[in-house]
């Protein structure tokens, strides 16, 4: 079972300066029409008060380097990343495969030891996994001998939460992830999407400050993936949990996030920070919004440029 970590919101800022070769670019705010829409979403629940000076997650000048014990070969995965995430913010990191996204997330989770730099969650230094953070990985990591209900309560059991209280807490999340009626199924009798929903519920039920998602839907087919993205949108609207997600699906990042951080090729540095001003609450229809397409294209373009790809339909930003 992998549990860990995060969460705070306000004006989140990119931290340490990247080298000149990978200068950070902040794209313009969304079109006025989009910004206007946002103010019209009166049904949107209030977020926690922004405390820009006290971010929920603060990463300073983070380096992650792996060393092969046999050969001594070193692989630099993350190079001087700085990031602040405010309470209630949904931030996604995108970048090419192998650029260092999971290494970064794993360091925030406390699962990978950084070579240098610091990570704090709600002001507490991260040195190992902790109950303030919860991680959902690409593949559901459920215990096959436990039922859906017992998988979701697993983290609570470990903390000694009485059975009755644990069951009460789980009730809310069963509905949230639409698994009502499947409480007594075992993971083997669930589809991939359902298993990942159990995983999400298991992470959420512990009420972590920070939810860390590493390509949570990558193993799913396109249709199920889209359904899960819509569910995550709805779950986030209801919980307003602080989320740090990594993905290489640009449209997924734009759909879900308040802010997208673009990583360079390995070793990962931040090359851009893009605020996503699409209206909330968001629904699947936002995908048909022209501003959505524009954001996706911009991010694709930045990643391709960082990879040195000049060809294609990407336009200058
Ligand atoms: N435990 C490890 N030991 C040694 N090298 C590692 C380890 N984990 C990752 N790496 C290396 O670090 C680099 C970054 O890997 P990472 O998994 O962070 O990339 P990623 O951006 O998450 O890629 P993907 O999108 O394919 O998941 C890669 O070169 C990888 O080989
Ligand atoms: Mg990865």
Image: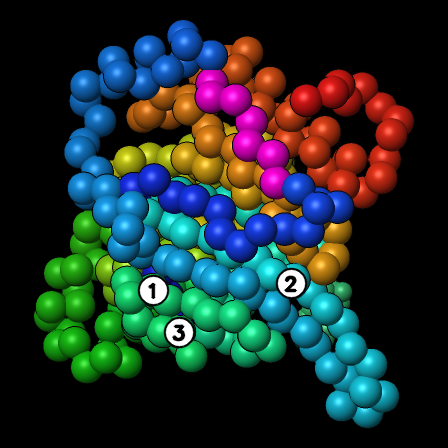
Pinpoint residue 261: horizontal percent, then vertical percent. Answer: 55, 43
- Tell me the magenta residue range: 24-30
Q: Secondary structure at mark 2?
A: strand
Q: Earlier in the sequence, mark 1 or mark 3?
A: 1
Residue that sits furthest to the front in the current view: 20
The answer to whether residue 74 is above or below residue 60 is below
Q: Earlier in the sequence, mark 2 or mark 1?
A: 2
The answer to whether residue 17 is above or below residue 253 is below
- Relative horizontal placement of residue 55, taking residue 79 as reference (left or right): left
Pinpoint residue 206: horizontal percent, then vertical percent. Answer: 26, 64
| Identity of the residue drawn at 55% across and 32% down | 26
| Identity of the residue drawn at 31% across and 26% down | 281
Confirm or deny contact between disc 1 and disc 3 (CB under 8 A).
Answer: yes
Q: Nearer the viewer, residue 193 or 53?
A: 53
Instruction: Tell me how far mark 2 sits from mark 1, CA to CA.
Output: 19 Å
| Identity of the residue drawn at 76% across and 41% down | 306
Q: Secondary structure at mark 3?
A: loop
Number of marks in the image?
A: 3
Q: Which residue is mark 1?
A: 121
The answer to whether residue 135 is above or below residue 294 is below
- Relative horizontal placement of residue 184, taking residue 221 as reference (left or right): left
- Relative horizontal placement of residue 57, taking residue 109 as reference (left or right): left
């Amino acid at each position: 079972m992998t549990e860990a970590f995060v969460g705070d919101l306000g004006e989140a800022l990119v931290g340490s300066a990247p080298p000149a070769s990978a200068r950070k670019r902040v794209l313009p705010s969304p079109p006025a029409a989009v910004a206007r829409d946002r103010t019209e979403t009166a049904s949107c629940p209030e977020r926690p008060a922004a405390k820009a000076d006290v971010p929920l997650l603060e990463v300073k000048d983070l380096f992650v380097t792996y060393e092969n014990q046999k050969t001594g070969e070193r692989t630099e995965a993350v190079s001087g990343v700085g990031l602040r995430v405010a309470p209630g913010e949904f931030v996604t990191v995108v970048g090419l495969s192998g650029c260092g996204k999971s290494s970064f997330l794993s360091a925030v989770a406390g699962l990978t030891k950084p070579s240098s730099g610091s990570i704090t969650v709600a002001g507490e230094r991260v040195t190992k996994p902790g109950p303030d953070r919860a991680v959902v990985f690409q593949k559901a990591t459920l215990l096959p001998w436990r039922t859906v209900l017992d998988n979701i309560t697993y983290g609570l059991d470990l903390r000694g939460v009485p059975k009755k209280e644990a069951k009460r807490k789980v009730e809310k999340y069963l509905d949230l992830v639409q698994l009502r009626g499947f409480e007594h199924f075992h993971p083997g009798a669930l589809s991939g999407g359902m298993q990942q929903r159990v995983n999400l519920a298991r992470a959420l039920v512990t009420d972590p400050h920070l939810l860390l998602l590493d390509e949570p839907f990558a193993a799913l087919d396109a249709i199920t993936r889209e359904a899960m993205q819509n569910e995550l949108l709805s779950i986030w609207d209801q919980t307003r949990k602080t989320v740090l997600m990594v993905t290489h699906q640009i449209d997924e990042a734009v759909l879900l996030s308040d802010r997208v951080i673009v990583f360079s090729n390995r070793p990962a540095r931040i090359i851009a920070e893009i605020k996503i001003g699409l209206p909330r609450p968001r629904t699947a229809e936002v995908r048909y919004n022209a501003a959505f397409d524009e954001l996706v294209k911009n991010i694709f373009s930045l990643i391709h440029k960082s990879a040195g790809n000049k060809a294609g339909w990407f336009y200058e930003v």
